[in-house]
């Protein structure tokens, strides 16, 4: 039942999302952008969260460092 509503955590306006976009040192895991579920989380969060420079940020990319501001990437290409 939880999986059918999992997207709510990423799309809800009152939640903060933390993304671990960089793997730990020495990891052989696929890159964050090459995995299905993380890509879905990331894209849903980009669409749903309001973008404001005041208040508590709703998106953190911990892979870039917690002191860095989150930067929205350009839209994905269909090609």
Image (spheres, rainbow, N blue to C red):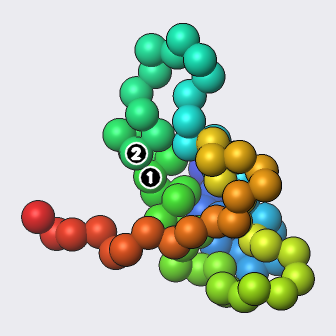
| Disc number placed over residue 39 in the picture, else none | 1
Question: For this view, does 34 lie left or right of residue 40?
Answer: left
SS label for mark 2: helix
Which quarter of the rendered picture does the C terminus lie within? bottom left
Q: Can you tell which quarter of the image residue 33 is in? A: top left
Q: Which residue is mark 2?
A: 33
39 and 52: which is toward the camera: 52
Q: Give the residue drawn at x 88%, y 83%.
A: 55
Disc 1 versus disc 2: nearer the observer: 2
Q: Is residue 66 toward the left or the right of residue 78 in the image? A: right
Compute the Cα span from label 1 to label 2.
Answer: 6 Å
Q: Earlier in the sequence, mark 1 or mark 2?
A: 2
Tell me the residue at 66%/85% (across/down). Answer: 51
Given the current orientation, which residue lies at the most extreme right position?
A: 55
Would you say the residues marked 1 and 2 are in contact, meaning their CB atoms lie under 8 Å apart?
yes
Mark 1, secondary structure of its residue:
helix
Instruction: Decide if residue 54 is in sight here.
Output: yes
């Amino acid at each position: 039942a939880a999986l059918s509503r999992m997207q709510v955590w990423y799309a809800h306006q009152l939640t903060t999302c933390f993304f671990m976009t960089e793997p730990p040192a020495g990891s052989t895991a696929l890159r964050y952008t090459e995995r299905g579920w993380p890509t879905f989380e990331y894209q849903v969060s980009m669409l749903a969260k309001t973008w404001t420079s005041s208040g508590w940020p709703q998106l953190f990319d911990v892979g870039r460092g917690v002191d860095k501001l989150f930067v929205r990437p350009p839209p994905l290409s269909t090609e």
